[in-house]
Image (tube, grey):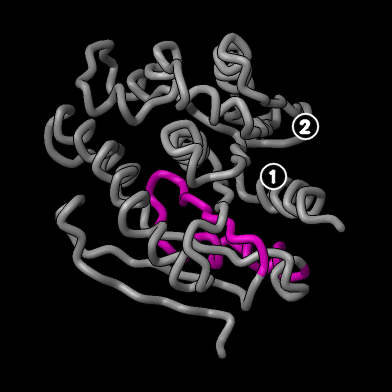
Amino acid sequence: MSTFLKTSWYSHRVERNVTFVRWGYFGQPVFIFPTAGGDAEEIERFLLIRALGPLIGAGRIKVYSCDSVAGAAWFAPEGSIEHRMWLMNAFQRYVRHEVVPAIYADCRTDGIPIWTAGASIGALHAVAMLCRYPHIFGRALAMSGTYDILRFAGIDRYTEDYYKATPMRFLRNLDGDHLALLQQRFILLASGEGHAENIGESWALARLLGEKSVPNWVDSWGPGWAHDWPTWRAMMPKYLGEWTHG
């Protein structure tokens, strides 16, 4: 069996062809969201898979990814602002209803807890999926995140689709069993404070999570770490290594 798997299909949820990839034989499933314009194999081209190689080779993690459908559309830009907001929600529903079953099938274990991870816009989706579906996802590693992207469009209006897809919007109204389950999960918000980083985004989300008693931690790497792949190649193996130790 190869450690690498690549498959594609047409998703009616996002109305386009999508690609799904996997690296590894067995271990804790980790779904890594790409950055804004990335595709499913971005994390290999930028050497993140190489950095995770020891954990993958030891069978401690299996890594999955997909195309950055919503992020790519947002910054292209594709269509109207309302279309892009619709696609954010559609993309997260595609991950929930198409990618998650593909991971279950690959692991041959329905219901196996999945961890999410991502950098930049990928961090937003990693947190959103855990907060929306805590019965599916166990924890999230969000690196150098931007958690409310309306500012990139220069507007402050938003649709119901954007609300559903953005934790900074929907967390305030979470309650009941959904919130109770989310309070049993964990979100790590890691960020540098160097070039193009804005750790204030992480602190703003952490305050909101704290108000809802959702376990989280902001970890600053300081001014020597920029918003770029060398930072994320250092961060992700460290945290995933700690989480799978022993």
- Residue 189: x, y in percent? 65, 31
Tag count in the figure? Answer: 2
- Residue 11: x, y in percent? 20, 60
SS state under label 1:
helix
Residue 80 higher or lower than 34, as above or below: above
Residue at mark 2: 221
Is the residue marked by circle 1 packed among few (<14), some (14-19), or many (20+) residues within 10 Å?
some
Tell me the quarter of the picture where residue 237 sits: bottom right
Residue at mark 1: 231
Q: Amino acid at mark 2?
A: Trp
Say whether disc 1 or disc 2 marks the residue closer to the N-terminus. Answer: 2
Q: Amino acid at mark 1?
A: Thr
> Is residue 70 left or right of 111 when viewed as pictured?
left
In this view, the residue in front, 174 or 188, is: 174
SS state under label 2:
loop
- Residue 23: x, y in percent? 57, 72
Alpha carbon separation for disc pair 1 and 2: 9 Å
> Is residue 219 left or right of 177 when viewed as pictured?
right
In this view, the residue in front, 170 or 54, is: 170
User: What residue is at 45 percent from the left and 27 percent from the top?
Assistant: 178
User: What residue is at 27 percent from the left and 37 percent from the top?
Assistant: 89
